[in-house]
Image (cartoon, rainbow, N blue to C red):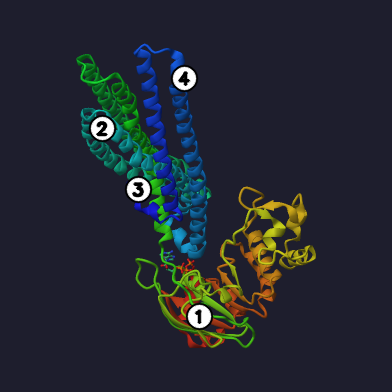
Amino acid sequence: MIDKKLLTFPRIRLVLVLLLGLAGLQAASILGQACFLAKAITDLWAGQALSEQWQWIGFFVLCYLLRHLILWRKEDLLDSYSRQQAQRLRQELLSKVFEQGPSLIQGQGTGNVTTMALEGIDQVEKYLRLILAKSTTMMVVPWLILAVIWYLDWRSGVFLLIIYPLIVIFMIVLGYAAQAKADRQYHTYQLLSNHFVDSLRGIDTLKYLGLSQRYARSIFKTSERFRRATMSTLKVAILSTFALDFFTTLSIAVVAVLLGIRLVDGTILLFPALTILTLSPDYFLPIRDFSNDYHATLDGKNALTAINQILAVKTTEITKVSLPAWNDQSQLTISQLDFAYPQQSKSLQQLNFQAIGFQKIGIIGLSGSGKSTLINLLGGFLKPQSAQIKIAGQELASFAQPDWQRQLIYIPQNPYIFRASLRDNIAFYQPQATTAQVEQAVKVVGLERLVAQLPAGLDTQIGEGARALSGGQAQRIALARAFLDQSRKILLFDEPTAHLDIETEVELKERMLPLMTDHLVFFATHRLHWMQEMDWILVIDQGKIVEQGTLAQLQQQHGAFVQLSRSLRSV
Ligand SMILES: Nc1ncnc2c1ncn2[C@@H]1O[C@H](COP(=O)(O)OP(=O)(O)OP(=O)(O)O)[C@@H](O)[C@H]1O
């Protein structure tokens, strides 16, 4: 009855035992309530004075209060337990997302991960709260009530016992139908989230191409599908609630009629008949409650399955290797590196190269040749299928090593600007940087004009939803970050100027080059002029290094580099 997935939650067994205990007390208070009320009415019927009934009425009121006190205690217990578990799940989910990095987000979709971490966890919290309370009550309360009814009148007991499994079977059949509908609903919900976030991100492209109306229609269609899936789940939910209420009410009516006939016949006394009649609705109440809330919990159940799937993504345990800080004598050797994206044939094959000291290594190739993939591997965001990597004499399986990543600065095509002040964005790697240091960085990368224009200077909020920046300004912030943190000696550039106009690129290049000295630099680009600044060049074509050497060597060889230069110039 209780989802196996829930049994893996911490302290769940203790909570279940407490809930079962409270359900036992709840059953006792329901029984007391029915017996004392029946006793008072029977005595009054027998002609006793009302003043003699105060003790029974008093007990009845006590039981009534106890019943509600228990309900309140149960809710309190479940509220705090489910809240704690939701917090734990959210933390685990976010840790997993940060641990797995961009590959997990790409696989699941940004919208889906966002809704899962926000709404999905809230649904799981609701699921926990409802399902634990309802199922433990259903395990205890009806059976204790049935035992007392059986003791008072076995014929009513038999009738109620026979009717119960019929209702359960009926509930299971409708439950399966509802589950199938809810699965479909959850799937369309995930689609809707991804589709919506995707469209919002691409809204400028869509607008430029005049396709935003068409996309709005497509979002409308996806939302309509989600609405229809929701309505059809609700239809089953409402139908089953109605049918269940109808059957249980009918059963109680049958019990009442049978008791009435036997009272007239004189084959049953008023006290047991009244007690049974009062207890019958409470006998069915737990299953009715369970079934009513069952549909409300399905979303939570599905969200929990989806969250568990992400949490179950295997974390390849890395053996941490302690690496010294990169210096002018350090050496990196990569041999036979192979990498493939999931469900793809090899994206990078048999890469072999070396990096020594503060070399500047250019990675050049046509679009789709594998430059970004190589940069992502060097940053440890992706893990090679196989490779022999040696840094300072230490063998590594991948670059996902804290000691390596702590030395990196990654500058992509579109550096991410966090929603924070300009100062915090610049001091991203060095939060303790002084204002003088930040101002120095601003000067070095040529951001003074921007700072002068901003209303609160360095303290102006920038990023998502705040002051927007141009591509060149964002790139300058990324460079300022690199300048501020001189302790990170490895710079990974992934097409940093690809989307900038030529004037901005020339100006930025002048500012970038001094920053590159005394650093190991990997610079992926398809802009040839950068190669003049590089000490070593890797020419990549279709995932292979087809040539490598200094610029002079490559120009002399008249091989792949010269061919590539021709085709890049003719573009
Ligand atoms: N996340 C991914 N999943 C599957 N395949 C991918 C993924 N990212 C890239 N690829 C594929 O891997 C190959 C190399 O892509 P990569 O982005 O490394 O090329 P690139 O040389 O950097 O291209 P560009 O200059 O256009 O950025 C391409 O065929 C691309 O389609």
Give residue 372's position: percent from left, percent from top.
49, 69
**Residue 2: which disc?**
3
Secondary structure under the numbered disc 1 in the rendered image: strand
Question: Mark 4 CB in 8 Å range of ligand 1?
Answer: no
**Residue 538: which disc?**
1
Sequence-earlier tag: 2 or 4:
4
Give yes or no for contact between labels 2 and 3 (Cβ–Cβ under 8 Å): no
The quadrant in which residue 28 appears is top left
Depicted 237 relative to depicted 92: above or below = above
Sequence-earlier tag: 1 or 3:
3
In this view of the protein, can residue 169 be seen by the observer? Answer: yes
Give the CA distance from mark 4 to mark 1.
96 Å
Give residue 163's position: percent from left, percent from top.
22, 32
> Viewer-nearest of labels 2 and 4?
4
Q: Residues within 10 Å of mark 2 (few under 14, many from 20)?
A: some
Give the CA distance from mark 2 to mark 3.
28 Å
The residue under label 1 is which amino acid type?
A: Leu
The residue under label 4 is which amino acid type?
A: Trp
> Viewer-nearest of labels 1 and 3?
3
The residue under label 2 is which amino acid type?
A: Trp
Name the residue rendered at 23%, 37% in the picture. 165
Sequence-earlier tag: 2 or 3:
3
> Viewer-nearest of labels 3 and 4?
4
- The residue tagged 4 is 54
Sequence-earlier tag: 1 or 2:
2
